[in-house]
Amino acid sequence: MTENFVEELRWRGLLHNIMPGTEEQLQKESTSAYIGFDPTADSLHIGSLVQIVLLMHLQKAGHKPIALVGGATGMIGDPSGKSNERNLLDEETLDKNIKGVKKTLERFIDFSSDADNAAEMVNNYDWMKNLSFLEFARDIGKHITVNYMMAKDSVKNRISSESKEGMSFTEFTYQLVQGYDFLHLYTHYNCKLQIGGSDQWGNITTGTELIRRKVQGKPYALTSPLVTKADGTKFGKTEGGNI
């Protein structure tokens, strides 16, 4: 490796949580890692800047970046850090937004070279579109308990007595759907690491737990601090006050 990726993040103040063994894995071999990008608009907001920087440093360190755009999960909506359920998008809008996200990312990471660590972009709609609810419940849902899912902060905050909106079943299942993404990338792309913002730790660890339980794998995870607005809330394309 040309540089210690984790040490670089520490030096830059870009490391929030890291799963034990992650740094050792990255030092041992070139590792594929992915970050998910939400295609709810045709461009990325300033809150995505840290994630883009992480992909740049990941590739510079000799690792392979995978940028996942949530064509499927964008139809559901991630409840992490949100107080209200957001509007769901149609397929035509999502397709337009996905193309815009890739155009942005191509300015910062190398998708086109013949190098072993050239970046890839994947769309989780490609492996979700033909997955039936019964298959998902049987093959994925049985590996994660409701107790485990209820313990996540993103769930507890939305169903607390202070929350007026509550949480729909659609949003409740989001962490399982994201976990399935990690499982798919782990088994089909040899992707061993998921990276995200600090608000994603709960969703990411659902994925690592799913991989351990279903295929007895050794996945890894790390998160970075969030870029927040003046009021302390996260940037998001569905939230107000964004840049």
Image (spheres, helix red, strand yellow):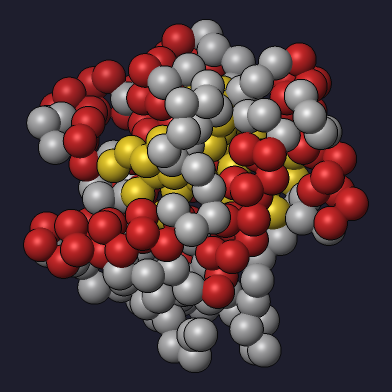
Q: In the figure, is residue 204 to the left or right of 145?
A: right
Question: How many tags in the picture?
Answer: 0
Residue at image location 63% in from the left, 29% down from the top: 63
Q: Is residue 199 left or right of residue 121?
A: right
Q: Name which residue lies at 50% across and 43% down.
A: 110
Q: Residue at x 65, y 88 (%)?
A: 231
Against 169, is 66 above or below? above
Whether residue 28 appears in this view of the structure is yes
Side of 130 relative to 227 (left or right): left
Residue 159 visible in rendering? no
Query: 41 and 107: which one is in front?
Result: 107
Is residue 89 depicted above or below 192 in this figure?
below
- Residue lying furthest front in this view? 113
Q: Position of residue 228 (x, y in %)?
A: 64, 76
Residue depicted at x 33% and y 38%? 122
The residue lying toward the viewer, choosing from 188 and 220, is 188
Q: Nearer the viewer, residue 237 or 112?
A: 112
Residue 84 occupies which quadrant of the picture? bottom left
Residue 93, horizontal then vertical, whole percent: 16, 66
Residue furthest to the top: 216
* Residue 1 pos. (x, y %): 76, 24
